[in-house]
Amino acid sequence: MQPSASDSYLETEVLTATPQKRQLMLIDACVRFIERTRHHWRAEQDEAATESLIRAQQIVAELIAALDHEVDPKLTRQVASLYVFVFRALVDSSLERDEAKLDDALRVLAPQREAWEGVCKELGTTTPLENEAAAASLSDHDTPPKRHAGLDLSAASDRPGEATAGFSLEA
């Protein structure tokens, strides 16, 4: 089966995105799947709700796995504990079909999303071409910030596709 144009675009966008942009894309996808779960529950579509919830859990598991514990162990443990809380909230929501648990997960993800969005804006990571131009304009002694809003920017993988292993971000 031939991939659709939107599938090809999404794949290209993920593979060419900076680590910071991929982190933001993962969080956005997780939020989207959590909201889909809520929608499917309300529509009594249990199978679709389960699929959405599993995909959100997979994304959170990938966010945890992508953390680099060698860069700043204390900060990494704090971020990991946030993601573990989100994962547990998603599992509990599944067991109890509890929308309040979905809300708990979203409350934790919202500031993470805002922080990564700020990082992307600060670094100008809207498109790969803009990123290359910005990197080329840096002098030898200027370097982009390594941390923003308490987040270690090196925690996201810089290897294309690693942050999306095993599932897709498609809407």
Image (cartoon, helix red, strand yellow):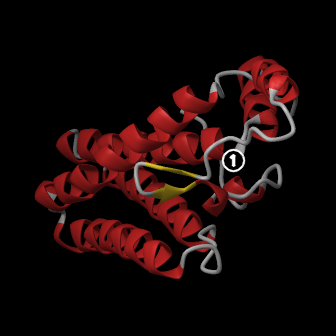
Could you say whether the residue bearing mark 1 is in a helix, strand or loop?
A: helix
Relative to the observer, which residue lies in front, 71 or 31?
A: 71
- Left or right, 21 with respect to 160, comes to left
Q: Residue 50 placed where, x, y %?
A: 39, 58
Q: Is residue 153 above or below residue 74?
A: above
Check disc 1 and report the residue beneath it: 19
Q: Is residue 138 above or below residue 152?
A: above
Q: Residue 104 placed where, x, y %?
A: 19, 58
- Asked whether residue 169 is in view, the answer is no
Which residue is drawn at the image coordinates 66% and 55% (left, top)? 167
- Asked whether residue 77 is in view, the answer is yes
Which residue is drawn at the image coordinates 60% and 53% (left, top)? 153
Residue furthest front in the image: 141
- Determine the image quadrant of residue 21: top right
Looking at the rendered image, the quarter that the N terminus falls into is top right
Q: How many marks?
A: 1
- Left or right, 79 with respect to 97, comes to right
Q: Residue 120 placed where, x, y %?
A: 57, 33
Q: Is residue 11 above or below residue 72?
A: above
Which residue is drawn at the image coordinates 52% and 38% (left, top)? 119
